[in-house]
Image (cartoon, grey):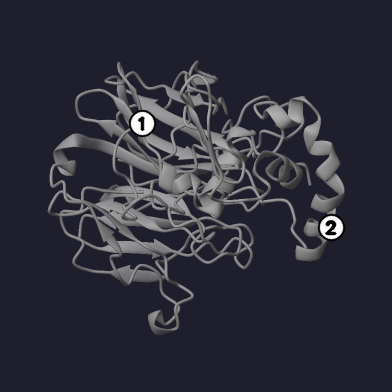
């Protein structure tokens, strides 16, 4: 309701509205997003992209103070019109995005990978496409031009860092940085990941990264393993403004058990409760699930207890990622095996008495030399 009223006050709900301020910055689109924020003019003149930006800047609709018309109260005279519009369109609250790999923004997890040529590529889900026969990832839908990703990227993960409903790309680089690429698919030529907007130095002591919504606020948080056996979790700051950064100080430090036997980690809502859980594969062949548990009595952090494990065969897997491919609210699991296969495990928690993963549901060959998936 407030969001619509603010848009009416700011622009008259005109997606092409533009205003140049005395300091040289420009406000654009429905919610008059200022040019200090990391969005192109093409994005901000697109109604959906502008709405996604407003959602992110407002902290998921919880803080409208960055807008002058909210602070002055000017938006209040539009509340009746906003209420009527919301009721007419039956608009509800935007759900928390539980699909960590959803780069297309359609609520179904997609697959991002570094392929055998060293390109960053995206396979849109497509499971609801009639010609796909109920299978995801049958067609590569985008490929970048850069063929250096196999050398550049040490670990990748995709999740919605900015809170706009589109998964962003986080990359642990071979030269010791954490680079974050906001999703740019609604800008320009539709390329998903064009340039890193945030780059953190001094990440050379980290080995694997995984992003997902750990605290159920609609913004992806970050987990990372270290060379000295720690697991670090950074909760998203949800900051807005010119100096905003999604990750700053360390939130939780798990001081043992995450050494060089960890092959890879992933975050996904495997239990279906809306909170990201942690998955890990190890050199002893185990696949382990650490359910979130942050809301359990006496808990002040997630991932404290091992919830479930498969105890053989996962030492033949090189890389994993997890997201909701089928739209049932439970994260499915993707794995690259040393046999050159992409293996997809549909989550069976609802039919297997809480066991999330058994045999692979879909297997795709010719995935040899794929370096990373997310």
Residue drawn at (16%, 59%), measured in percent from left and top?
Answer: 368
C-alpha gap between disc 1 and disc 2: 39 Å
Sequence-wise first label, 1 or 2:
2
Residue drawn at (56%, 58%), measured in percent from left and top?
Answer: 355
Q: Which mark is residue 84?
A: 2
Q: Residues within 10 Å of mark 2 (few under 14, many from 20)?
A: few
Closer to us: 270 or 136: 136
Q: Label 2's element?
A: helix
Residue 40 percent coordinates (x, y): 41, 41
Compared across the picture, whether 349 is left or right of 319 comes to right
User: Pointer 1: what residue?
Assistant: 197
Residue 98 percent coordinates (x, y): 57, 50
Residue 70 percent coordinates (x, y): 75, 31
Q: Which mark is residue 69?
A: none
Q: Label 1's element?
A: loop
Closer to us: 160 or 362: 160
Residue 318 percent coordinates (x, y): 26, 48
Closer to us: 180 or 372: 180
- Residue 155 in sight in this render: yes
Residue drawn at (52%, 38%), measured in percent from left and top?
Answer: 220
Q: Nearer the observer, disc 1 or disc 2?
A: 2
């Amino acid at each position: 309701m407030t969001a619509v009223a603010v848009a009416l006050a700011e622009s008259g709900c005109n997606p092409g509205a533009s205003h140049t301020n005395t300091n040289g910055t420009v406000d654009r689109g429905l919610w008059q997003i200022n040019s200090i924020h990391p969005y192109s003019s093409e994005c901000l003149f697109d109604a959906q992209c502008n709405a996604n930006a407003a959602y992110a800047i407002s902290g998921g609709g919880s803080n409208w103070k960055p807008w002058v018309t909210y602070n002055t109260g000017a938006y209040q005279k539009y509340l009746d019109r906003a209420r009527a519009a919301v009721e007419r369109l039956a608009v509800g609250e935007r759900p928390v995005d539980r699909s960590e790999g959803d780069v297309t923004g359609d609520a179904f997890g997609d697959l991002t990978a570094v392929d055998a040529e060293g390109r960053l590529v995206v396979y849109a889900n497509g499971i609801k496409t009639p010609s796909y026969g109920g299978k995801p990832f049958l067609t590569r839908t985008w490929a970048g031009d850069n063929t250096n990703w196999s050398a550049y990227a040490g670990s990748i993960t995709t999740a919605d860092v900015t809170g706009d409903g589109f998964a962003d790309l986080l990359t642990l680089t071979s030269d010791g940085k954490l680079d974050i690429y906001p999703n740019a698919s609604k800008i320009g030529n539709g390329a998903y990941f064009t340039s890193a907007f945030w780059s953190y130095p001094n990440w050379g002591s980290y080995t694997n990264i995984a992003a997902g919504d750990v605290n159920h606020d609609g913004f992806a948080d970050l987990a990372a393993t270290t060379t000295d056996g720690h697991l670090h979790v950074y909760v998203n700051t949800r900051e807005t403004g010119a100096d905003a950064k999604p990750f700053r100080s360390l939130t939780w430090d798990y001081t043992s058990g995450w050494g060089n036997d960890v092959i890879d980690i992933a975050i996904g809502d495997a239990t279906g409760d809306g909170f990201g859980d942690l998955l890990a594969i190890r050199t002893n062949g185990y696949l382990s699930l650490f359910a979130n548990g942050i809301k359990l009595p006496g808990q002040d952090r997630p991932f404290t207890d091992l919830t479930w494990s498969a105890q053989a065969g996962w030492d033949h897997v090189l890389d994993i990622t997890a997201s909701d491919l089928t739209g049932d609210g439970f994260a499915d699991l993707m794995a690259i095996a040393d046999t050159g296969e992409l293996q997809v495990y549909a989550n069976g928690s609802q039919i297997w008495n809480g066991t999330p993963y058994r045999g692979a549901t879909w297997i795709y060959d010719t995935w040899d030399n794929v370096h990373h998936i997310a």
